[in-house]
Amino acid sequence: MTSRARAERWAVTSAGHGRRGRWAARRLFRAAVRGDAAARDGVVQVARTPGHRLRERATHAVAELWAETRDPRLRQAVLDLSALAVRPLPRLLTRALLDLLEDGDLHEVGLLPVLLTDPDTDVRDRTATACRNATGRVLSGLWHGDSGPGTSLRDVLLENSRPPATPRKLSGLWSEWIETPSPALGDALLRWGRPAPTVPLSVVAVETGRDVLLEPAHRAALLDALLLGDHPLRDIAAAKFDALDDRRLVDEMCDRALTEAGPARYCAERGLVPKDPVRRAMFYLLTGRPEQLRALDPDGGLLSLAYAAAPDAVRARAREVMLADGGLDLVRVIVGDDRRARIAAMPDAEARYLAEQLAARREWDDLWALVQDLPIAAGIELIRLFGRWAPRHEDQRRLFRMLHDADPETVKAGSEQLRDERRAAVPQATFLFHDRVNDVSFAPDGPFLAVAGINKVAGVFDLRTARLTERYGGFGSSVGRVLHLGGGTLIAGEQPNHGQPQCRLVRCADGAMQALHTTPGAVTSLVLTGHGGSFAAGTRAGELLLGTPGGPVRVRPVSEFGLGKRQWPRQVAAHRDSGRLAVIGASIHLIDPAAGTAIRVCPGSSTVQAAFVDADTLVRAERDGALRLASPPGARHDRSPLVYVPGFAGLGTLPHIGQLVVACGQGDLYFLNGSSLERAGVHSALRPGKPTGLTVSPGGEFLAVGHRDGAIDLFDLRLREVPGLIRRPVADLVPRHLGLVAAATADPAITGDARSLLELLRASLEHRFRYDVEIGDAVRLAAGEYDISL
């Protein structure tokens, strides 16, 4: 029997419903699966026979058999019958062959790579077409199944007109291309034109808007892209760099060239140089263009300015290049014209480098000048570089020998001794007044103390002799406030006695008194507001009085600044450099009298006293002894209590060292860091009992602490500043500091290494200021206890 006849017989017999028909059907399908060609033809014939009871089963079987065998006759049958298999992979194969792939079929992501590499051309092409046209969630699913470059699925997804919808996948593709540029991936990313938020270089690749490209993050990315070597993004970035024609971008690339080889090469290739001549000088130095540098800056002045403004990494490179060049004046470049400012800002490593190079060149005079400018400890370390050289002049040789013979360990030990907390404040004298004293004020220009008395009198004491040098009587009531303006001028404010309706603000100078203003209620506060004797006063009537040493006062009601009646000034504090005032009323307001503005800092405050740490920061003391730092909105926010002083009794600032001094209820003096309120020292009370007040001199040199029995203890705080002078460059010190050091050396309690160190610093300052000041003019306060009467 022929194969065709057998196929027809199976097709006919399997159509029956009886036992014979069922037996024939089972035999037919088993034989087809085993590979019997006649059986397979029979299955095809069954599938083609309308009304056959097994037609549907045969149709599925045809599709399954083709997917398994790839028999060309079965393939044609699949096409003729539109036969679809049931199992997942054969089903996808037959749907692809029939061009019936739908979005739902593409969810079988794990099977798609098989179809995309199928030997049947139609299956491959139609699967690829479906992937190229996928959208929405189907496209996201396909990208989720992406297994990376070099796969068929990746290749067809890159041909899709839509990018991945998920930012994470898009960012990954951009990062992949930037790391390993692939033409296909690059073409797709550029065609899609969608940057990744987390990959700035992608913005450079596809964005064209000038404003977008010149945003700070994108500017940096654009410059990064220019350094990508043979990466295709480099050419894209270069075209955009040229089109932008932005001078700032050029300067930024030139700045990079100072520390990086890649930008230096790019600048050389494109002929880029900084616009600013100062920056151009450093650029020429560090990019190896000595001829251009000498033509631009023959005397090194521009290079010196550039060096002073450069960050540490650029300075380090510049020193290396200058050392190799040998023709540049190191002192001229590194120190510059403003010797004091540059030495003060010079790091230790830079100072040592400069000293060693000067010694190597045997430029002894320049090295000696440098050693004298540095901090004492650094000068002693470097003095060994001189070998047998010594200065020619005798006064210089004396200082040279002192530095040469000094022991670095002595300097270190002496510095530690000077920082001893027990030297927080040096008690000098006690003034015991027979009558109550309401207020005291140190003069800003000398060792004088103004005193306001309850017995309608004010006076000035010379603290060097403890004697009354000026006395003013004739006040209408007791003097509640007093302020020494310097130059022999006092301002005194009356307070009411027994219901007195009016009080005066009075200027006292050269033995004469002049009423400046009359107000209902007391003068509550007097403060210096500048460095030329200007002052401010607050009154119970809600006024701010602004004046100068010899002129009239200007009356400014606080209402002019938007403050209500409850905001009358209980106290006024001033920042003398900025002229800003702090008015402590029911709240605290920062006031700029010149601008006429007020900013509320602490609403509903329980502050009893405040002082400026800097122009934008106050320290305020509350009734319970809590000290807080406060700032206006936009500066620093009000902070939680950082320190608690039980029984708060007074507050003052020490401007030269950035510290505060606070008196507690036991009379102890706490010295605090002005920016953090961390403790910097404590002085134990001289006498028991809570002080009545605390006053610091304008420069922070002296301190007065009042007591209920009428006594005022005077302290010398100058020694607190001395440890800081040891660490500062001598070039940064001024004649005033010589007085501080002289006062410290006069203290018999300072002995040993600390005294040796002070004597060495004093000798350095005396040599430095030998033509400027009279040596030995340090102020010495009278010591002891004095009974005083106004």
Image (tube, helix red, strand yellow):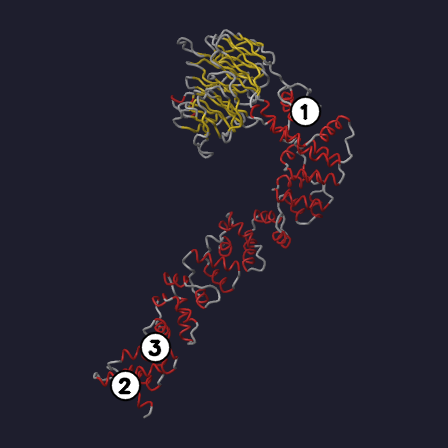
Question: How many C-alpha atoms fall within 10 Å of the one at disc 2: few (<14), some, or many (≥20)?
Answer: many
Task: Please give the residue where the numbered disc 1 appears in the rendered image.
Answer: 759
From mark 2 to mark 1, how far is it between C-alphas?
Answer: 124 Å
Percent position (x, y) of residue 743? 63, 20
**In the foreground, 591 or 65:** 65
Q: Are marks 3 and 2 in contact (CB under 8 Å)?
A: no
- Residue displayed at 73% across by 33% down: 368
Query: Going by the image, does 163 lie left or right of 331?
Result: left
Amino acid type, mark 2: Ala
Percent position (x, y) of residue 356? 71, 40
Q: Which quadrant of the view contains residue 74?
A: bottom left
**In the foreground, 279 or 11:** 11
Amino acid type, mark 1: Glu
- Residue displayed at 35% across by 86% down: 37
Task: Please give the residue where the numbered disc 2 appears in the rendered image.
Answer: 11
From mark 3 to mark 1, how far is it between C-alphas?
Answer: 106 Å
Task: List the single residue furthest toward the front.
Answer: 752
Element marked by disc 2: helix
Question: How many C-alpha atoms fall within 10 Å of the one at disc 1: few (<14), some, or many (≥20)?
Answer: some
Amino acid type, mark 3: Glu
Q: Which of label 3 and label 1 is nearer to you?
A: 1
Percent position (x, y) of residue 393? 78, 28
Task: Please give the residue where the numbered disc 3 appears in the rendered image.
Answer: 64
